[in-house]
Image (cartoon, rainbow, N blue to C red):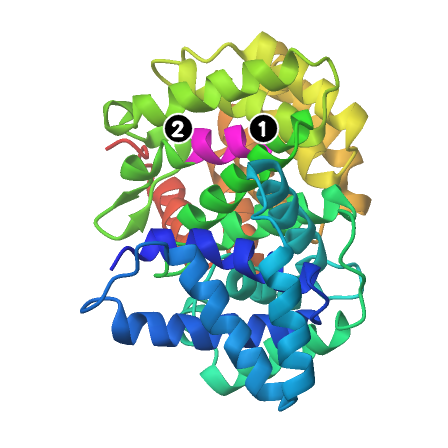
C-alpha cells in the first residue's frame, strides 16, 4: 500500500466532505475510519480510484452516524450532481484545511497535533510517539482541538502566517524526534506551495530544504555537530540546489519576509566550502535585513557572529552586552557569548559561558554539545581535534 498516496489524499477528502456541509470533526473522524478500512482491504483488492473510494467509504460512515434515511438520500443525490473538484479546488481545500488546523484559537501544540493528524494523515499513536507523550494524552489534545474549531466556516483561507508558523514548528521539532516530522513538514509545505503563490511559502520551503540538506553531517557518533565543524562533503547538494532555486523564485517577487531572509542566510552558509570561507560581509547584510524586519532577540544575537568576523570580536562583544537585559535568559545569549569570547582569545570565560548556555538549553543534544565544548575549552582542546 502506498502510504504517501493515502496521506496526500487525506486533506482532499476531508476538504470535500466539509465543503458538502459536514462539520470538521465529524468529517475527519469519518476519513480516519475510511483509512482504517483501506489498510484492511486495499492490499487484497486495491481500488481503481483511491480518492473516490475514500470519499464513498467516508460518506457512508457519515450516513451511519446520522442514522437518517432521508438525509442519506439527499446527500447521495447532491453528490451525484456535484462535479469532481479540479486541481485548483483541491489545492484550495488543502490551504483552507491547513488554515483551520492552525486557527488562532488553538495553542501551537494543539495546532501541530491537529495538522499532523488531519492534513498529514499521521495516526494519533505516531504523533504521540513523536512528542514522547502517552497516546491517550495526544488523543485528548486532538479531540479538544477539533471541538474548538467545530463551528469555523469552511469557506476561505485564514491567516497564512499562522499556517507557516505551525509548519516551521513541525520542521523544528522534526530534528528532535524519532518520527521524521521534518520530512512531513516539507511534504505539507510542498502542498501549500501548490495552493499559494505567496513568496513566504516558497521561502519557508526553501529554508527547510537548505537546512535538511545538511542532515547527514549534523550528527557524528550520536552527537550533535555544529555548523562550523560539519563535513560539508556529506551535504545533499541536490536538496540544497532545490532550496536555492525556490529562494531565488521567492526573492524575485520583491516582497521579502522573515522566512525568505532566513533562507538567504542558510543558502550563504551552504554555498561556502568551509566555515572560514563564508561570505561574512554578505551574511552580515542579510542579518541586518532580518533584524530590521523581524527584530526578535535570536536574530539580533545571531547577527553578532558575522559582525565579529567582519569588524572583530570586541565590537560584537560590546553589542552583545547591550542585549543582556532583553535576552540574558536565553541559552543562545550565552552560546553566542562563548563564541565571541573564544574568538577574542578568552577561553576560560568562553568555557563559563558555554556552561551557562548548557544549563539553559531545552534540547538534550544541544545541552550535551555545550557541556562537552565547555570541557574542551577548559582543557585547551580545539573542537576539530
**Residue at 30% of width from left, 27% of height from top?**
236
| Image quadrant in which the C terminus is located | top left
State which region is magenta.
Answer: 203-211
Task: Look at mark 1 in the image and give the residue it sits on.
Answer: 202
Q: Where is residue 240 in the image (x, y as percent from the top left)?
A: 39, 23
The correct choice, above or below, for 222 with respect to 296 in the image is: below
Depth check: give the residue in front, 128 or 78: 78
Horizontal side of residue 326 vs 286, given as left or right: right
- The part of the image, by quadrant, that contains residue 320 is top right
Horizontally, residue 345 falls left or right of residue 218, namely right
The local crowd at label 1, few if under 14, some if 14 to 19, many if 20 or more residues have their Cα within 10 Å, is: many
Dot 1 or dot 2, earlier in sequence? 1
> Is 139 part of what is drawn in magenta?
no
Residue 360 — which label? none
Q: Where is residue 36 in the image (x, y as percent from the top left)?
A: 37, 76
Q: Quadrant of the N terminus?
A: bottom left
Q: How far apart are marks 1 and 2 (CA)?
A: 27 Å
The outermost residue toward the left is: 44
Q: Which residue is at the front of the view, 296 or 90? A: 90
Disc 2, SS: helix
**Residue 82 position by quadrant:** bottom right
Pinpoint residue 77: horizontal percent, then vertical percent.
63, 67
Amino acid at each position: 500500500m502506498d502510504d504517501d498516496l493515502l496521506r496526500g489524499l487525506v486533506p482532499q477528502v476531508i476538504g470535500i466532505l466539509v465543503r458538502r456541509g459536514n462539520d470538521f470533526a465529524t468529517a475527519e473522524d469519518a476519513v480516519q475510519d475510511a483509512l482504517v478500512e483501506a489498510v484492511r482491504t486495499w492490499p487484497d483488492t486495491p481500488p481503481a480510484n483511491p480518492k473516490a473510494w475514500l470519499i464513498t467509504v467516508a460518506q457512508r460512515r457519515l450516513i451511519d452516524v446520522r442514522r437518517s434515511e432521508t438525509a442519506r438520500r439527499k446527500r447521495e443525490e447532491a453528490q451525484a450532481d456535484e462535479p469532481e473538484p479540479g486541481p485548483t479546488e483541491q489545492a484550495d481545500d488543502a490551504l483552507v484545511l491547513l488554515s483551520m488546523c492552525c486557527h488562532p484559537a488553538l495553542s501551537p501544540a494543539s495546532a501541530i497535533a491537529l495538522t499532523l493528524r488531519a492534513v498529514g494523515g499521521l495516526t494519533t499513536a505516531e504523533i504521540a510517539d513523536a512528542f514522547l507523550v502517552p497516546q491517550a494524552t495526544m488523543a485528548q489534545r486532538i479531540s479538544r482541538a477539533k471541538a474548538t474549531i467545530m463551528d469555523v466556516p469552511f469557506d476561505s483561507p485564514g491567516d497564512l502566517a499562522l499556517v507557516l508558523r505551525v509548519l516551521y514548528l513541525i520542521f523544528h521539532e522534526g530534528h528532535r524526534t524519532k518520527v521524521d516530522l521534518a520530512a512531513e513538514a516539507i511534504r505539507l509545505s510542498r502542498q501549500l506551495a501548490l495552493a499559494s503563490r505567496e513568496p513566504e511559502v516558497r521561502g519557508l520551503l526553501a529554508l527547510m530544504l537548505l537546512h535538511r540538506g545538511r542532515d547527514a553531517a549534523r550528527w557524528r557518533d550520536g552527537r550533535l555537530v555544529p555548523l562550523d565543524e560539519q563535513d560539508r562533503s556529506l551535504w545533499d547538494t541536490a536538496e540544497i540546489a532545490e532550496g536555492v532555486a525556490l529562494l531565488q523564485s521567492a526573492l524575485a517577487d520583491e516582497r521579502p519576509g522573515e522566512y525568505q531572509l532566513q533562507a538567504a542566510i542558510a543558502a550563504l552558509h551552504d554555498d561556502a566550502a568551509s566555515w572560514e570561507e563564508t561570505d561574512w560581509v554578505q551574511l552580515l547584510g542579510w542579518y541586518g535585513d532580518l533584524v530590521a524586519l523581524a527584530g526578535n532577540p535570536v536574530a539580533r544575537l545571531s547577527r553578532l557572529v558575522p559582525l565579529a568576523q567582519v569588524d572583530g570580536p570586541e565590537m560584537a562583544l560590546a553589542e552583545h552586552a547591550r542585549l543582556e537585559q532583553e535576552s540574558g535568559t536565553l541559552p543562545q545569549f550565552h552560546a553566542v557569548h562563548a563564541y565571541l569570547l573564544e574568538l577574542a582569545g578568552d577561553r576560560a570565560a568562553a568555557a563559563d559561558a558555554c556552561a551557562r548556555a548548557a544549563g539553559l538549553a531545552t534540547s538534550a543534544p544541544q545541552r550535551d554539545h555545550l557541556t562537552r565544548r565547555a570541557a574542551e575549552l577548559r582543557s585547551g582542546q580545539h573542537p576539530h581535534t
